[in-house]
Image (tube, rainbow, N blue to C red):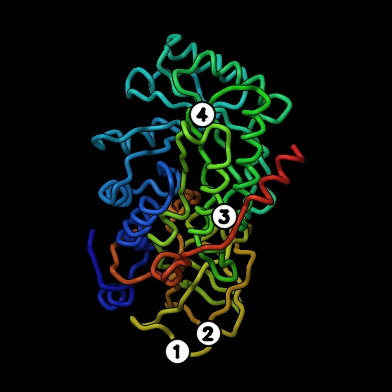
């Protein structure tokens, strides 16, 4: 894979026809080192966010040794990392996949959120006595940009029975939750940990691990989250107030926050029609989240290897390359007024999910790849983060206990 100092340097040497995935592995390494240095527990990388071998190798070299794999395909990508531990934190799995993960790959960590899944895991693993089971419970997702509580998670009226049942089968027992993707309020984690503590108190079950899931946010235009060390401070204070913190292992599963900065997409304008730009990628490709979740992304316009001069004061709609009319971006994009066919757009913060969500619909799935060494357009990690926090979660934690 060729390497360039910047996207503009690349465009001075080439005029690509395909979309171009511009990797910035140095940003993934920086993010990984920051998480490992600051999170008060084990950091599991959620492979789904960006399964590119270059990025996986970078994260491993930076020190990541725990990987959340939802499928055999993802497990294959990281199986060769020496000393790594693999976790299947997908709460619903095919029994054959469980069996193969256990017997062929040595996976011992499995998530579940119902009795039927518990029985399935136990049977598929040959009634093994060395399983680490992680009971996922549902928690409030209202402060996240992408709620994830409808599909997975044991509800309060069933979580207690499930936790007790899992304790009898597990060599190690954990509780996990997910506050939703791009969680904008650190206190969501305190509230969720309080719910776990209430569950422990009500059942009398001692757990060996607590997985606070993912949801750690990245920076996007108009979506500037609190510094990540505030999230870690809230989690640490809430965790230390639980009944089992002295004997319990703390875990997290970042995806977006580790790799959002690690890629941008370079797209070509194939036609301008009034205030609409037709691009060589769109809703069925790397702009899936922009089209379907209305996510905003940083963008710059480039012509002849240089950023186009002028104000970004004209709103354009975007269409992708397919024959489908829903291949469109809902949120208008502010760009220079003189945009024309042949110009390029670099769209940033696409290291999380953009490439893994793309399809080959209408035959437009092909894209090129390069490595660039410059900094991303937005970052949470190339600026000093706040330290010496005075934020306290004790009052909110006590209130949540009372409500439970």
Residue located at (51% from left, 65% from top) = 219
Distance Cα–Cα, label 2 vs label 3: 29 Å
How crowded is the residue under tag 3: few (<14 C-alpha within 10 Å), some, or many (20+)? many
Residue under numbered circle 4: 174
Q: Are marks 4 and 3 in contact (CB under 8 Å)?
A: no
Residue under numbered circle 3: 182
The mark that comes first in sequence, 2 or 1, is 1
The mark that comes first in sequence, 4 or 2, is 4
How crowded is the residue under tag 1: few (<14 C-alpha within 10 Å), some, or many (20+)? few
Residue located at (36% from left, 39% from top) = 66
Distance Cα–Cα, label 2 vs label 1: 8 Å
Q: Are marks 4 and 2 in contact (CB under 8 Å)?
A: no
Quarter of the N terminus within the rendering: bottom left
Distance Cα–Cα, label 4 vs label 2: 52 Å
Distance Cα–Cα, label 1 vs label 3: 33 Å
Residue under numbered circle 2: 336
């Amino acid at each position: 894979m060729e390497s360039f100092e910047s996207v503009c340097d690349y465009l001075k040497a080439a005029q690509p026809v395909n979309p171009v995935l511009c990797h910035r592995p140095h940003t993934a390494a920086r993010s990984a080192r920051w998480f490992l240095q600051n999170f008060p527990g084990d950091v599991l990388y959620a492979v789904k966010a960006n399964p590119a071998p270059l990025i996986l190798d970078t994260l491993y070299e930076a020190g990541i040794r725990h990987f959340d794999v939802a499928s055999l395909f993802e497990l294959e990508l990281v199986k060769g990392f020496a000393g790594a531990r693999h976790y299947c934190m997908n709460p619903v799995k095919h029994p054959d996949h469980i069996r193969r993960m256990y017997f062929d790959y040595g996976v011992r960590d499995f998530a579940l959120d119902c009795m039927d899944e518990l029985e399935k895991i136990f049977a598929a693993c040959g009634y093994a006595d060395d399983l680490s089971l992680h009971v996922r419970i549902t928690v409030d997702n209202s402060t996240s940009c992408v709620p994830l509580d409808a599909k997975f998670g044991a509800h309060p009226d069933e979580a207690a029975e499930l936790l007790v049942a899992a304790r009898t089968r597990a060599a190690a027992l954990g509780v996990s939750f997910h506050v939703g993707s791009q969680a904008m309020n650190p206190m969501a984690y305190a509230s969720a940990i309080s719910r776990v503590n209430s569950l422990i108190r009500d059942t009398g079950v001692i757990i060996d691990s607590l997985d606070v899931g993912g949801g750690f946010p990245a920076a996007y235009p108009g979506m500037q989250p609190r510094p990540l060390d505030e999230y870690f401070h809230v989690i640490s204070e809430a965790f230390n107030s639980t009944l089992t913190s002295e004997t319990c292992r703390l875990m997290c599963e970042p995806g977006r926050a580790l790799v959002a900065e690690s890629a941008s997409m370079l797209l070509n304008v194939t036609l301008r029609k009034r205030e609409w730009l037709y691009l060589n990628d769109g809703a069925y490709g790397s702009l899936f989240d922009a089209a379907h979740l209305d996510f905003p992304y940083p963008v710059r316009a480039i012509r002849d290897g240089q950023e186009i001069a002028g104000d970004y004061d004209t709103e354009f709609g975007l269409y992708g390359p397919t024959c489908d009319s829903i291949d469109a971006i809902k949120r208008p994009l502010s760009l220079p007024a003189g945009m024309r066919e042949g110009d390029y757009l670099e769209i940033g913060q696409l290291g999380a999910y953009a490439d893994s969500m793309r399809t080959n619909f209408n035959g437009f799935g092909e894209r090129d790849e390069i490595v660039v060494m410059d900094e991303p357009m937005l970052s949470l990690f190339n600026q000093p983060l706040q330290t010496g926090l005075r934020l306290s979660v004790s009052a909110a934690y006590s209130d949540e206990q009372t409500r439970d």
